[in-house]
Amino acid sequence: MKKHALTGWRVCLLLLLSVAGSDWAQAQPTKAEKKAAKLQAVRELVASRHYTFLAQSATPLSGASRQLTSEYTLTIRTDTVDSYLPYFGRAYTVPIGSGDDGIKFTSTRFGYTMKEAKNGGWDIEIRPKDVQGIPVLNMYISESGYTTLRVTPTNRQMISFYGYIKK
């Protein structure tokens, strides 16, 4: 009967694989650690008032939800709100000569109110003071960064956007 002895190179290979495997398993973050890191990143973004909302879909008050294929954004900075969003829905009045068919504006004078939501996340209210026709923008940002934005124009029906925030 022939015995198989572990030679020196086989022992080294087994040790190397076992050490590398244990390091790899320890280096992988758990689901709870990933969730906590994501929550902390979103919390810092919201607190900094320096983020961009990327709209993925729009739902007018009367009508079906539409997936957005172009990049539409609402950018929040401490001194500026810049909106480049589409509009689908009913307009009650439209200024003569207006070629603007979306919710596009830049505001440097605005009110910004943020409070913690009851179910986690943040409720944010933005009131542009130097933009005609857009009295308020309401945002809900979840702890994972997913966001709902409700725009209530003066002379148009309300519209909601769904997407996420990023730096």
Image (cartoon, rainbow, N blue to C red):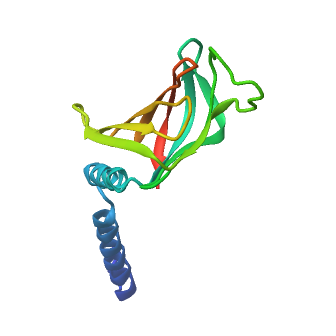
Q: Position of residue 162 (x, y in %)?
A: 49, 32
The residue positioned 62% from the left and 18% from the top of the image is 89
Dividing the image into 4 quarters, which one contains the N terminus?
A: bottom left
The residue positioned 55% from the left and 28% from the top of the image is 133
Asked if residue 160 lies left or right of residue 34, the reply is: right
Question: Given the current orientation, which residue lies at the most extreme left position?
Answer: 118
Query: Quadrant of residue 65 in the image?
Result: top right
Question: Given the current orientation, which residue lies at the most extreme top position?
Answer: 62
165, above or below 98, in the image: below
Asked if residue 152 lies left or right of residue 11, the reply is: right
Query: Quadrant of residue 148 in the image?
Result: top left
Q: Position of residue 91 (x, y in %)?
A: 63, 17
The residue positioned 27% from the left and 52% from the top of the image is 36
Q: Position of residue 150 (x, y in %)?
A: 46, 28
Q: Can residue 163 be seen?
A: yes
Q: Position of residue 137 (x, y in %)?
A: 45, 33
In-front residue for pair 5/136: 136
Asked if residue 74 lies left or right of residue 26, the reply is: right
In-front residue for pair 86/20: 86
The residue positioned 31% from the left and 51% from the top of the image is 43
146, above or below 63, in the image: below
